[in-house]
Image (spheres, helix red, strand yellow):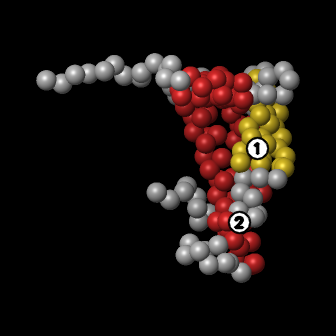
Amino acid sequence: MGRYASNTQVSEDRSRAELERTLLRYGADKFGYFFQEGMAIILFEFDGWPIRMNIPMPRRDEEEFMLTDTGRERVEGAALKAWEQAKRQRWRALVLMIKAKFEAILMGSASFEREFMGWIALPGGKTVGDEIIGKLLDAKEGGQMPKALPEFKIG
């Protein structure tokens, strides 16, 4: 399956501006973002909830940009073009994800707290996701998680 917006021509700047407009339209109180190598960090507040989303971004030196699908080395211009396309795709996917979450909240099938739980910032700098994902993985690997569906015997 192909990635959403893998051929988009929408610039990163336009996607970030759309993301800001979307968050403010749905009621975010504040909005900001910044970058560090391989990561975009989206910050906003909604009804008193501080949200910090760490979104992995493609790194310039990743093999997928340096090599073609057949394993041949790309020329510098082609590698740069592939990397820039991947960044545009990630920003479009992020905008889609945020819009979908808020639409689910508006139609009543989800709450803000459930949709954004993993990204709620906690005192000390971690997010709820940072705090619980390791514990959940340990429980899953240890066979301690309940089954989502009961066992059925046929016949």
Residue 83 at x, y = what percent?
Answer: 71, 66
Query: What is the CA distance from the residue labelled 2 to the residue labelled 1?
Result: 23 Å
Which disc number belongs to residue 83?
2
Q: How crowded is mark 1: few (under 14 residues within 10 Å), some or many (20 or more)?
A: some
- Name the residue at 75% across, 78% down: 76
- Name the residue at 59% across, 74% down: 71
> Given this view, does label 2 or label 1 mark the residue nearer the observer?
2
Q: In which quarter of the image is residue 129?
A: top right
Q: Identify the secondary structure beneath mark 1.
A: helix
Q: Which of 141 and 122 is in front in this view?
A: 141
Asked if residue 43 can be seen in this view, the reply is: yes
Q: Which of 139 and 34 is in front in this view?
A: 139
Quadrant into which the C terminus falls:
top left
Residue 18 at x, y = what percent?
Answer: 71, 49
Residue 118 at x, y = what percent?
Answer: 67, 29
Which disc number belongs to residue 20?
1
Earlier residue among tags 2 and 1: 1
Q: Which amino acid does label 2 sit on?
A: Trp
Q: What residue type is labelled 1?
A: Glu
Q: How crowded is mark 2: few (under 14 residues within 10 Å), some or many (20 or more)?
A: many
- Is residue 97 depicted above or below 86 in this figure? above
Which disc number belongs to residue 8?
none
- Name the residue at 50% across, 59% down: 2
Left or right: where 43 falls relative to 81: right
